[in-house]
């Protein structure tokens, strides 16, 4: 049996020495050290030995096991180094190859114009207010003096999540939320996405962006509104830009108006851009309705204010002379790379 152990050791060391891969080493370990391996068979035959031979053969078997385990561990380190070397050769980096040019993105035209508008109003002392796009009917309609019969409340115009929850149709709810929690003076703009049940075409989209503004303070007048909007228009479109206010109706303002700017393409002479009128409609505005102030806990006898709302897509189309709203949302790089 001693000779058998010496034979097992020699065979194991030869096989381990020849192994280069981890798989071959594992196979050798199972063959010689496993539960059904060569050494296990020796241990099973120990019962046939005499009492004097048993401890001698047992000691030799343990020594053989130790030598095989040490050889496998050493070979395992060699195999790992070999595998790493082979991997490095296979994945060698050719530093002489030219690098890949990674295209650098830039702002979307909507983001560019939004940042410009935000800078204009922040420069005039306004802060930016943001809020939920999934809004309560209470803030979207009730707090803004919109009667139950107002057409905007119809499902044909508004996306309802439930009877009490809608996708906001304007960013005006942020005006109500701010007035409800903040004591005047208040000067904010509220930019964000809004949703209306419209078919997508060249001038409409079920999702678009609005920027609404609100000022509440003592002795605020329509003159303050006009001068604010005039500053906004001249800063955005140029000092030569003129504005005009036309009477209109909105449930949350009284009096209300539409603001037009002089056509920046023909300078008021008339062209296809302005439909030969010389003026382009830009936004709606007006003095905050007393009912809205009361609903938000502000005394209309002490405070007054104005509000306005402009579509970001509208002023972006004008700014870059784009004739189809859908181009802003299709993410066509051929279009976006122009800006």
Image (cartoon, rainbow, N blue to C red):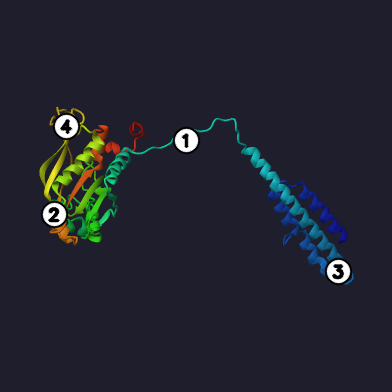
Give the x, y percent position of residue 47. 82, 70
The disc, 4 or 2, on the residue closer to the chain's N-terminal end is 4
- Residue 263 appears left or right of 27: left
Marks 1 and 3 sit apart, C-alpha to C-alpha, by 72 Å
- Give the residue at mark 1: 102
- Give the residue at mark 4: 274
Label number found at residue 289: 2
> Which residue sits at x=36%, y=32%?
337
Tell me if I can see residue 136 in this picture: no
Marks 1 and 4 sit apart, C-alpha to C-alpha, by 41 Å
> Which residue sits at x=78%, y=53%?
71
Hey, which quadrant is residue 223 in on the image? top left
Kindly report which numbered mark, 4 or 2, lies closer to the viewer in this rendering: 2
Marks 4 and 2 sit apart, C-alpha to C-alpha, by 31 Å
The disc, 1 or 2, on the residue closer to the chain's N-terminal end is 1
Q: In the displayed orientation, state which residue is furthest to the bottom.
A: 51
- Give the residue at mark 3: 55
């Amino acid at each position: 049996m001693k000779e058998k152990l010496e034979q097992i050791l020699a065979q194991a060391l030869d096989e381990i020495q020849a192994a280069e891969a981890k798989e071959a080493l594992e196979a050798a370990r199972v063959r010689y050290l496993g539960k059904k391996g060569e050494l296990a068979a020796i241990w099973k035959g120990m019962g046939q030995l005499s009492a004097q031979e048993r401890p001698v053969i047992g000691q030799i078997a343990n020594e053989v096991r130790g030598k095989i385990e040490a050889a496998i561990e050493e070979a395992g380190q060699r195999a790992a180094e070999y595998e790493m070397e082979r991997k490095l050769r296979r994945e060698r980096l050719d530093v002489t190859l030219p690098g890949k040019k990674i295209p650098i993105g830039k702002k979307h035209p909507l983001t560019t114009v939004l940042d410009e508008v935000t800078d204009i109003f922040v420069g005039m002392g306004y802060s930016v207010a943001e809020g939920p796009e999934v809004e309560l009917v209470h803030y979207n309609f009730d707090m803004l003096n919109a009667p139950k019969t107002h057409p905007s409340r119809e499902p044909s115009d508004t996306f309802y999540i439930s009877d009490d929850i809608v996708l906001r149709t304007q960013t005006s709810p942020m005006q109500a939320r701010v007035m409800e929690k903040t004591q005047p003076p208040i000067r904010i703009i509220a930019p964000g996405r809004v949703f209306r049940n419209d078919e997508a075409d060249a001038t409409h989209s079920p999702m678009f962006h609005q920027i609404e503004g609100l000022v509440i303070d003592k002795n605020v007048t329509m003159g303050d509104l006009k001068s604010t909007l005039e500053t906004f228009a001249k800063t955005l479109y140029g000092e030569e830009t003129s504005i005009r206010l036309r009477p209109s109706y909105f449930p949350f303002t009284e009096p209300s108006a539409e603001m037009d700017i002089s056509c920046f393409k023909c300078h008021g002479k008339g062209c296809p851009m302005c439909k030969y009128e010389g003026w382009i409609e830009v936004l709606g505005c007006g003095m905050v309705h007393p009912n809205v102030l009361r609903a938000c806990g502000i005394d209309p006898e002490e405070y007054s204010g104005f509000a306005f709302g402009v579509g970001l897509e509208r002023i972006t189309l004008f700014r870059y002379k784009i004739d189809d709203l859908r181009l802003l949302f299709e993410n066509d790089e051929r279009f976006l790379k122009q800006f």
